[in-house]
Image (spheres, helix red, strand yellow):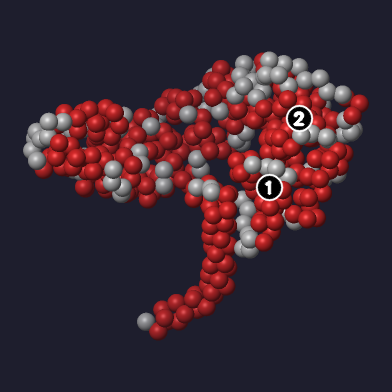
Amino acid sequence: MYSLIQKLVSFSSYSKPFSSATTLTHKVSNFTVSYLIESLGFTTKLAESISKKVSFEEKVNPDSVLTLLRSYGFTESQISNIITDYPKLLTLDAETSLAPKLKFLHSMKGASTSEFTEIVSTVPKLLGKRGDKTLSVYYDFVRDVVQAPENCRVLLLSRSSFPQGNLENKIRNVTALRELGVPQRLLFRLLVSSYQPVCGKERFRESLEKVVEKGFDPTSSKFVQALHVVYQLSERTVEEKVDVYRRLGFSVEDVWDMFKKWPNALKFSGKKVTQTFETLKKCGLIEEEAVALLKKNPQFLRVSEENIANSIETFLGLGFSRGEFAMMIKRYPVCIGFSGETVRKKTEFLVEEMDWSLDDVVSHPQVFSYSMEKRMVPRCGVIKALISKGLLGSELPSVCSVLACTDKMFLRRYVRKHDDDKELVAELMAYLHQRA
């Protein structure tokens, strides 16, 4: 006993610095979230998301940034968009870093306040660029794209004004993408990013031709994603990756179909693809079933072997057999990506509280994607109430009948049929408005 106490004391003493650091980080994060909610009216969810990218523990600097933006005529809506897209702006020094850039752009370009604020709020990351000449070229490009008629497919820019090097390549390449129909929201991300695909010259042209040849829609984000992947891979590397898939039972057409569904399917190493394939077989799938699963859901490749193993352990621990686990993967592959806590909590609720069987869950594994708070608990509350009043007969409705239908269908099926009893309907509606 004494030895155990010694270990606990020793562990406690070593964990204090870590605990203090964790507490400080949590405190800073909480301050950031509170500031974003109070100063910009952000939702808690958005504020928490932004706090993962940038954080601060005092409001002096972010207050100065917001005051500066307002002084230049940015509306509250534009400021919200700017901070959402480029939260790092709140950490810049308003006087020495941000003010000179805003002053330069506003005074040198001779634009109206509304035009100026529209351009900057459309691509706020241009304020992160250094050097007046570079900043000017980025600004001009964004202005020309924003102001060009929607039906204008060709952007006429003065090549003589471009500085030499990567920026010239980047603007030329982004212009080419615009001519193909790539939407502004994707163009501007490429313009201000440091990703290679739009910085090259010959390599960019070759990659673009391959992506167009594969039939990707230029208006979709997959087009840009595919461009990234193709740009990064040599012909030899692509051939080697395709060969890995072929050895596992895929045809060349299968591989390119997977690439069109999810371009990142070609980014994984042959070792990772093979490991995932073998792990699926260990889960109980035969070779043809594993091929079919990955053909339909290539995104499955990003799930680690460790997560798959943990998922198997969780399901088996809850009483599912390996055969049932394999069946659920075939019916709803993404269920393997849910956390053990989610799977356990929902299974116990459905089986122990609602008295559905494990077979019912196996037949409809989509239940693991349903919200406990917004769907499962409220709807099941209605079912329990109806059962207690003897209004559902002797058999419990199927999981699918209760949880898979739309809200409108559920109301019609289990609530509106009792419209003649206003008190009962009010009671049932109260269940639907409750939260877990």
* Front one among 79 and 237: 79
Residue 70's label in the rendered image is: 1
Q: Residue at x 62, y 22 (%)?
A: 219
Q: Height in image: 352 above or below 138?
A: below
Q: Residue at x 57, y 30 (%)?
A: 265
Label 2 residue SS? helix
Amino acid type assigned to the residue bearing label 1 in the image = Arg
Local packing at callout 1 (Cα closer than 10 Å; few below 14, some 14-19, many 20+) is: some
Q: Nearer the viewer, mark 2 or mark 1?
A: 1
Q: Is residue 157 visible?
A: yes
Which picture quadrant has residue 347?
top left
Q: Height in image: 10 above or below 254?
A: below
Q: Which residue is mark 2?
A: 143
* Front one among 104 and 261: 104
Residue 249 at what x, y percent from top left?
51, 24
Q: Are marks 2 and 1 in contact (CB under 8 Å)?
A: no
Q: Residue at x 57, y 67 (%)?
A: 24
Q: Residue at x 67, y 27 (%)?
A: 184
Residue 216 at what x, y percent from top left?
61, 19
Measure the alpha-carbon separation of dots 2 and 1. 21 Å
In the picture, the quarter occupied by the N terminus is bottom left
Q: Decide if residue 172 is on the left or right side of residue 270.
A: right
Q: How many marks?
A: 2
Q: Between disc 2 and disc 1, whose residue precedes?
A: 1
Q: Height in image: 183 above or below 125?
A: above
Label 1 residue SS? helix
Q: Is residue 119 visible?
A: no
Residue 413 at what x, y percent from top left?
21, 28
Q: Decide if residue 273 is on the left or right side of residue 434.
A: right
